[in-house]
Image (spheres, helix red, strand yellow):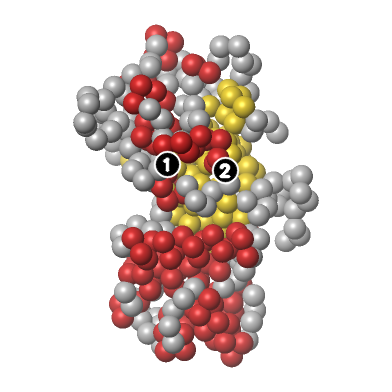
Amino acid sequence: MENPSPLEPLLKVKDLHTKFTGPDGDVNAVNGVTFEIKAGETVGVVGESGSGKSQTFMSILGLLARNGVASGSAEFHGEELIGASNRTLNKVRGRAIGTIFQDPMTSLNPYLPIGRQLTEMLTVHRKVKAKEARYAAAQILSTVGLPDPSAQLRRYPHQLSGGMRQRVMVAMALIADPELLIADEPTTALDVTVQAQILELLRSVGRDRHRSVILISHDFGVVAGLADRILVMYAGAIVEQGPAADLFRAPRHPYTRALMACTRGLDPEAGLPADGDLAVELPPGHLPSIPGQPPDLRRLPMGCAFQPRCAQARARCLLSAPENYAVGPDRLSACFLERKGMAPKLVPSS
């Protein structure tokens, strides 16, 4: 695929919906998501578990379960991926878009050595000869910090530690040199030291390889030092988005402020709001938390999906869902509190 012009997004998603059919009713996992990813930028996608982060990108890559159906549009280099054939998607997955999944033990094949799994990425997607592929596999293992890479090629996933398996997943995602890397909760279940090492690897992908990175996480602290821009998701929709520095400095949506307040380790001057600005009222000395539970995606509440948990909810919030309103340069927030004196603007205009 040709490199996009500086004015054209690498990935353009518009009005994406994903629905799963089940015995207890349809689950509306993704609800009208629209965003763009530019070449060379790192975007953090943040939200609680079940907010639709992973399913958004599973939909784009055509990796939904059999009972899942995606609609809308997701164009990569102008080529539509939603509803595309497996042949088209197989040319994109791994080769142009690399993916790091949450759990390496369920993503790596337990019956094949690491070397076989790495070299297949090159022999299948790049048509590289076996000898050259094995050399490249050893090189990429060295790049991600695994000691004695030649020996690691002969090992099986169960013979590696959790941190080593995650490094292998990063290596598999990078070996075909994709233009876009999607990292889905890549530091889950890793200790703090290994987490920092994995995040530094992802930082180097954008900085040294000049590739686009999407970092999916439930933790603002994970994306704080990496993301150029942040998308905040709730109940399958994007409720706020904007440049990372601006969003941390002045979060606008009540959910963003509440979620940020629950994240320990953030610099208060870089985005952690004062208690009086939170979407929830906190007794003195209590650990900040968001009351209630995320909504049942089979029965979303009327109006704004966040209103049952929001201390700033008004009557209108119960009656209709807010659009995304412009709240600053390249910033959007789906909250009626932003409407006063501002014209609504959908995310983003085509």
Gap in Å between the C-alphas at discs 2 and 1? 18 Å
Q: Which numbered disc covers residue 288?
A: none
Q: Position of residue 176 (x, y in %)?
A: 60, 71
At a point 49% along the width and 21% down the height, the residue shown is 335
Front-lying residue, 115 or 221: 221
Residue 148 drawn above or below residue 174: below
At a point 32% along the width and 69% down the height, the residue shown is 162
At a point 56% along the width and 25% down the height, the residue shown is 324
Mark positioned earlier in the residue sequence (2 or 1) = 2
In the image: residue 129, left or right of residue 236: right
Residue 170 drawn above or below residue 345: below
Residue at the disc numbered 1 = 267
Q: Position of residue 280 (x, y in %)?
A: 32, 24
Residue 172 drawn above or below residue 55: below
Instruction: Judge whether residue 328 can be spotted in this image.
Output: yes
Kindly identify the amino acid type of the residue bearing the numbered disc 2. Arg
Quarter of the image where one finds residue 91: bottom right
Query: Mark 2 packing: few (<14 Cα in 10 Å), some, or many (20+)?
Result: many
Are circles 2 and 1 on residues that touch, CB within 8 Å?
A: no
Kindly identify the amino acid type of the residue bearing the numbered disc 1. Asp
Front-lying residue, 245 or 52: 245
Query: Mark 1 packing: few (<14 Cα in 10 Å), some, or many (20+)?
Result: few
Report the quarter where the C terminus lies: top right
Q: In what element is the residue under mark 1?
A: loop
At a point 33% along the width and 60% down the height, the residue shown is 192
Q: Which numbered disc covers residue 229?
A: 2
Quarter of the image where one finds residue 262: top left
